[in-house]
Image (tube, rainbow, N blue to C red):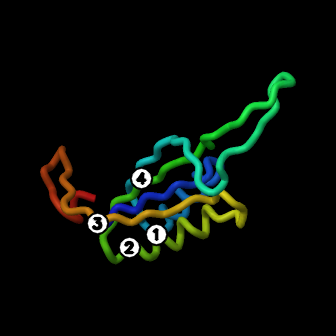
Amino acid sequence: MKLVTAIVKPFKLDEVREALGELGVTGVTVTEVKGFGRQKGHTELYRGAEYVVDFLPKVKVEVALADEMVDGAVEAITKAAQTGKIGDGKIFISTLEQVIRIRTGETGVEAV
């Protein structure tokens, strides 16, 4: 099993969720996060004063998947989240050692 973590632009969240839903992904965890990469923030003007926004708002989407679903999910996230501009985000894939559903005690892929 793998944990796919995608950091995407907030306005792309619905498209990413729909793309994963079409693949049959039933569970997604979403967290509002802030950060920066190569963008390194930007400068904004507020009431005549200029200030730097170091951390940009992003959305972290986490999905636990069976190994055979990972490639399709990565492709779906990439297509749905891509704008072609800097700051589109990143996808990280990690190995999950064990998953346990608390309510039933199911483990492994059945718990996902």
| Residue 45 % position (x, y) | 82, 31
Other residues around mark 1 within 10 Å, as few (<14) / some (14–19) / many (≥20): many
Q: Are marks 2 and 1 in contact (CB under 8 Å)?
A: yes
Kind of residue indicated by mark 1: Ala
For the residues labelled 4 and 3, the Cα–Cα distance comes to: 17 Å
Mark nearer the N terminus (3 vs 2): 2
Mark 3 lies on a secondary structure that is: strand
| 76 sits to left or right of 106 | right
Residue located beneath label 3 in the image: 95
Find disc 2 in the rendering and name its residue: 69
- Residue 14 visible to an observer of this rendering: no
Q: Are marks 3 and 2 in contact (CB under 8 Å)?
A: no
In three-dimensional space, the C-alpha distance between marks 3 and 2, rounded to whole angstroms, equals 13 Å
Q: Earlier in the sequence, mark 2 or mark 4?
A: 4
Q: Residue at x 51, y 41 (%)?
A: 32
Local secondary structure at mark 4: loop
Q: Residues within 10 Å of mark 3 (few under 14, many from 20)?
A: few
Which quadrant of the figure has residue 53?
top right
Secondary structure beneath label 2: helix
Q: Which mark is residue 73?
A: 1
Q: Work out whether residue 62 or residue 85 is closer to the camera in this orientation and state it.
A: 85
Residue annotated with mark 4: 28
Q: Amino acid at mark 2?
A: Met
Q: Amino acid at mark 3?
A: Thr
Instruction: Choose the circle earlier in sequence order: 4 or 1.
Output: 4
Label 4 environment density (alpha carbons within 10 Å; few <14, some 14–19, many ≥20): few
- Look at the numbered discs 4 and 1 and tell me whether their residues touch, using CB distance below 8 Å: no
Q: Is residue 95 above or below residue 28?
A: below
